[in-house]
Image (cartoon, rainbow, N blue to C red):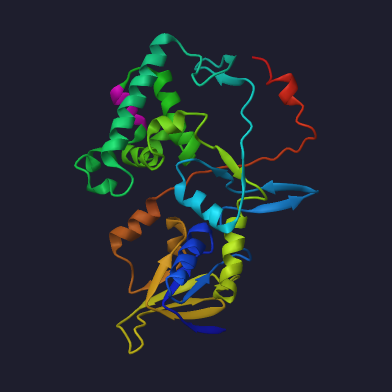
Amino acid sequence: MLNLDRDVVIVGAGPSGLTAARELKKAGLSVAVLEARDRVGGRTWTDTIDGAMLEIGGQWVSPDQTALLELLDELGLKTYSRYREGESVYVGADGTKTRYTGDSFPVSGATGAEMDKLIGILDVLAAEIGATEPWAHPKARELDTISFHHRLRANSSDEEACNNIGLFIAGGMLTKPAHAFSALQAVLMAASAGSFSHLTDEGFILDKRVIGGMQQVSLLQAAELGADVVLNSPVRTVHWGDDGEDGHHVSVVSERATVNARFVIMAVPPNLYARVSFDPPLPRRQQQMHQHQSLGLVIKVHAVYSPPFWRKTGPPGP
């Protein structure tokens, strides 16, 4: 059992936790990172299966992710552009499939106009509210007490337009139904991308991938941190107390280590907070928020071909 004294202890060795640890260490502070799994990377995971290198977790880099792009450059990682040539298939409200090219869905003029209207409304809200303090905006409560689904329908009676616009955030970003999160969360997602229009721009979103896989962001940072990263060490308890003579007032106990520190960073999804016992407990409302915050659901399927024959034949017909 390790017994460590640090300035900061970070729970979670995904990209966020490791980046925080690396930046703190660069600033002259001592750190320890505790990770429950036997690997770093969190939801980024690159593995080789039957000779094929697969990104089992997150893989995309978009132009709005400026901090990530700077980190990739700092770590010496290169990117390559997504293949974008060819036709797409649009499935209409009645199930009809239509092949098309270009940025616009092949919908009626009326539906297209409603989609443009909704995009404009969301762009204005994203610009007003911003990505740094959405809760501080006068419209925050109004937007947070209505689902994204109902907010769209309050602004348009065109069901196909609402479904299409909802798709960019619900299915595309948060990977859960538009009725399962608030309009404020949708606006925050749009604001973090710079605008809602960016999310609808096929030439902008999901732009590049990392040569060798996204997990390298975590692997390289963990290599720099060395023994400060402790794997196979799920955190069980976070004890808060008064400042001691050494300035430590938090003790984090995991399967393999106890870390006494001045601060703790929880770099894990909020729904995992319940697996940790906090002493004294977190505020009741914060606990309720963690319990009710749902994450998206993605099932990723890999099919490996050599060569990519579909680029010559095109997508399946309608």
Name the side, left or right, on which 159 lies relative to 88: left
Residue 207 in the image, given as x and y percentages of width and height: 55, 37
Name the side, left or right, on which 223 lies relative to 268: right
User: Which of the 4 image quarters holds residue 285?
Assistant: bottom left
Q: Nearer the viewer, residue 49 or 53?
A: 53
Give the vertical position of 279 relative to 273 (above or below): below
Give the vertical position of 112 relative to 130 (above or below): above
Residue 257 in the image, given as x and y percentages of width and height: 53, 79
Q: Which of 275 and 249 is in front in this view?
A: 249
**The magenta stretch spans residue 153:** yes
Name the side, left or right, on which 93 lies relative to 179: right
Q: How many marks?
A: 0
**The magenta stretch spans residue 278:** no
> Residue at left 40%, top 71%?
264
Question: Which residue reaches farthest bottom?
Answer: 245
Magenta stretch? 149-155
> Residue at left 59%, top 53%?
44
> Residue at left 52%, top 30%?
203
> Residue at left 57%, top 47%?
58
* Quadrant showing the N terminus: bottom right
Q: Which of 213 and 11 is in front in this view?
A: 213
User: Magenta segment, principal secondary structure?
Assistant: helix
Residue 145 visible to an observer of this rendering? no
Residue 208 in the image, given as x and y percentages of width and height: 58, 40
Give the vertical position of 72 relative to 314 (above or below): below
Give the vertical position of 117 relative to 143 (above or below): above
Residue 202 visible to an observer of this rendering? yes
Residue 128 in the image, given as x and y percentages of width and height: 26, 37
